[in-house]
Each structure stands twice: as structure tokens, then as C-alpha cells.
Image: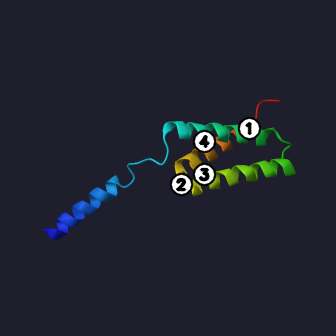
Amino acid sequence: MKLITLLFITIALTACADSHPDANDAELEAAASKGREMGAEAAALTPNSMEQQAAILEIRSRESAIREAGFPSCADTFAIEAEKAFLHKPAE
């Protein structure tokens, strides 16, 4: 009986462990917006240039800093939006 009670408590605590998100909607939107901005700036640079490579490294550095600050959801959103903006180059 004690084992069943302990198991139930463990399952309940595990289920509730991730119920608090690391970021709210405004923070996620800010990360997405900055990611789109930085991705578009990198895409506008000369392809394969040192400047473009530096911009890409800056995006990766910013993602790592956001993640290390304890906001993995914002880091994921930032990186995804930066990649989308970088790969979606406007028609020339």
C-alpha cells in the first residue's frame, strides 16, 4: 500500500513539474521578432561573405545566451524565426 501511495505521489509530482512555462506570450513574441530581424539582416548580406558568417555566429551566440539565461522556449523560438527569415530571401 505504501508503495502504491509513493508511486502515485511521484507520478503526480512528475506530471506537475513542467506546468510552469519558462516564458510568457510577450517574451516569446519578442524573441520571435528579434529572430526574424536578425535572420533578415543576415540574409541581406553578401552570400558566404565574412560579414554574413559573422551575422550567423551572432544569431547562434544570442540563442545560446537566451538558453543559458533560463529561457529555452524563447531560445527555440528565436532560432526558428531567424532560420525562417534567413532562408526566405525576397525575390530579386
Label 2–label 4 contact, CB within 8 A: no
Q: CA distance from mark 4 to mark 3?
A: 9 Å
Q: Which residue is mark 3?
A: 66
Whether residue 48 is visible: no
SS under mark 2: loop
Amino acid type, callout 2 = Gly
SS under mark 1: helix
Whether residue 59 is visible: yes
Sequence-wise, the earlier of marks 2 and 1 is 1
Residue 70 got which mark?
A: 2
Sequence-wise, the earlier of marks 4 and 3 is 4
Residue 31 got which mark?
A: 4
Residue depicted at 66% across the width and 41% down the height: 35
Q: How many marks?
A: 4
> Mark 1 against mark 3, which lies toward the viewer?
3
Q: CA distance from mark 4 to mark 1?
A: 14 Å
Residue depicted at 63% across the width and 47% down the height: 79
Q: Quadrant of the C terminus?
A: top right
Label 2–label 1 contact, CB within 8 A: no
Q: Which residue is mark 1?
A: 40
Query: Relative to residue 72, is residue 63 drawn left or right?
Result: right
